[in-house]
Image (cartoon, rainbow, N blue to C red):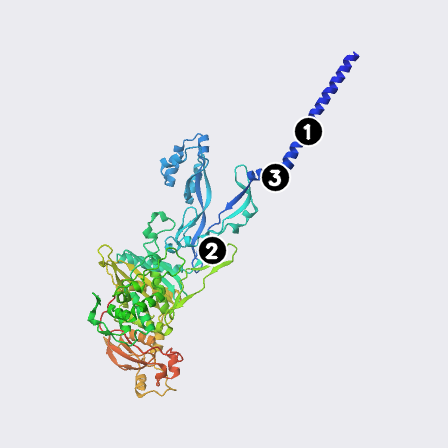
Amino acid sequence: MTDLSARRRLFMRMRIALLATLLGAGAGGVVYRAWDLQVRRAAGLREMAEEQYLREVSLSSKRGTIYDRAGAELAVSVDADSIWANPSAIKKAGVDPRVIADRLSPLLGIDAEVLAQRLTGDRHFVWVKRRVTPAQGKAVRAMRLAGVAISEEARRFYPNRELAAHVLGFANVDGVGIEGLELALEDKLRGPKQTIPSVLDRRGDVVFSEQLLDDRAAQGSEVTLTIDKTLQHLAERELELAVRSYEARAGTIILLDPSTGELLAVANYPTFNPNEPNKSGSAERRNRAVTDRFEPGSTIKPFTIGGGLAAGAVSPTQGIDCENGAVRVAEYWIHDSHHFGVLTPAQILAFSSNIGAGKIGLAMGRPGLYRALTRFGFGERTGIELPGETAGILRHYKRWYDMDAATIAFGQGVSTTTLQLAMALGAIANKGRLMQPLIVKRVVDSHGQVVQEAVPQVRRQVIPENVARLVSDMLIAVTGPGGTGTEAAIDGYLVAGKTGTAQKADYVHGGYADDRWTASFIGYAPAQQPRLLAAVVIDEPLIAHQGGSVAAPVFRRVMGPALRHLGVAPEGASALAELAAPHKVEAVQPSAAAVEQRSAAPATLEPVAAGDVLVPNLVGQSLRPAIVLAQQAELVIRVVGTGLVTSQEPPSAAVVRRGSQLTLHLEPPNLAPSLTPATQAKAGVQTSAQPSPTHELLATVRPGGQDG
């Protein structure tokens, strides 16, 4: 019994020892494993763990908003529903993908067979349709389809539809700019991609990230344009009306401020809806204002004459024989639409004589004409922040043929864009200074810091200021009685401009096509202090083809309301009456003829009988207000000289037939002893300025005019 108890105790002790040994070994193993995991392999395991629940999430910025110059939204990013599916979940749920496809197909406009194939398989994610309408998203939610879900994505939206579509361009479904400023300003609008640490759950969804709480981290820069929404709408409306009315192929209008180079409107027709760019072709989406080249025709003549005057190749009073409508240069003939004799440079512009402009080009010589046109910006890009700009074509003068100096001078053998043409005329309106065109006014980043601010920039002084002023005076006659641009005249404003009618090249048979034309008009107002400039180009009109009858009326219908929108008040009846009133003569010792004219000056400009008008008193006036008053009285004026009006024929208060000629003799202020400084100041003349060269400006000599 004792031996049995002893054996039992020994066995118990052995069991306890074995258990203790096993427990000790297990504890040692645990300790070793813990040391191995937490000490020896800690760094590697920590990295493995973080790879499972931490991710460097790429945060795409929300695309910045584009505004017009007044803060109206032109392009915004909004949240939109996107529908996706999990084909693996559909399969596990035992649902036939064809049933789901049949229900979604009519709602989303997707082919049922294609959608069913997409929903079949073991994938975990496929897009059904991205960025659907709110109504479509609501309907899909109500269906509660197995394996079909909805998430939100940012969608680019253009609230004004077609307005400024060619300027804005559009972004694709992934929010990447494809055309227009959306493409040119992609880096600024989209903003930098940011990589931030985030905590994920077992499904891979972000559950926490401190930086995600900062909304500014997911916002692109905001862009403010120089475009004026009201003027843009006005230009697009009138352009569409003109293209449809004249059954034209296309058209373009540009409005800009010549003193700053800011583009206020860029309109093209046909146009497109950037919300649905896939419904339009490349022809509708092309920004013709900067991409399309065309021969400018007669609209290039102001720059030929301006360059000739600046170079001294022609003088303002020089008579140029226009050969009665036809002249031979080399083996070719140059024609005018009317038979003109000797014309001054001003008359060449007013009547748009090809022969006169060609002779000025020949007088300048190939290097001189080439240098003048390149200084106006022809043959080079303007540098506008719009993609796809072309430089036009102006071959180097060493590659010109014998007659190119003549034909290029009146707009054949050279091509330009509407923007180039507008900026070149802006140099004449802006005292000879060629400006850098501006379309982006300001860029503000997500933190409110201005990162880009547009500042008016002068590219170069093209022609002297006095020459620019002289050419500007000549351009006024184009819209006056007998000029080619009378349809561009605006009541209450003095308009300077030039018409253009150019035959299009026939690339199949060579030469120029007889039935395809480009009609254009470029001009600015008020001519005395230009506030707004417009370039109108109508491509291949069928009903009519002359710039004076097709493009000039569009200019008038756009420019008149645009000037009023900008607050440029017209000269009303009271202002015209003040200009027409006799000058005070207390401190003057005028000639007897001047006293007689002033004492007989009429109080109004009303006709005294049917077909008769009273001649206004224009003595003491400068050229521009004199032209305005003469137009109001329906008289054809002939101006000789420059400066102030010293005498007129017939005298004031004379009764003449409507349309009669009124000859004005002008002299520089320092040569007009009968006019005191007070009278000169009232006429708006700067007596301290050096007088421009004496010239003769003939508003009209014979009825009708040519639009070359």
Give the residue at x 32% y 54%.
270
Identify which amino acid the numbered label 3 is placed on: Ala
Residue at screen point 37% across, 82% down? 679
For label 3, the SS is helix
From the image, tell me which residue sits under label 3: 43
Q: Is residue 596 above or below residue 636?
A: below
Mark 2 Cα within 10 Å, few/some/many (few <14, many 20+)?
Answer: many
Please say if the residues under marks 1 and 3 sit with CB atoms less than 8 Å apart.
no
Q: Position of residue 111 (x, y in %)?
A: 35, 38
Instruction: Please report whichever mark, 3 or 2, sits nearer to the chain's N-terminal start.
Output: 3
Q: Quadrant of the C terminus?
A: bottom left
Secondary structure under badge 1?
Answer: helix
Q: Quadrant of the N terminus?
A: top right
Identify residue for label 1: 27
Give neighbour class at mark 1: few <14, some 14-19, many 20+ (Cα, 10 Å). few
Q: Is residue 418 above or below residue 475?
A: above
| Residue with the mark numbered 2 | 222
The amino acid beneath tag 1 is: Ala
Q: Nearer the viewer, mark 1 or mark 3?
A: 3
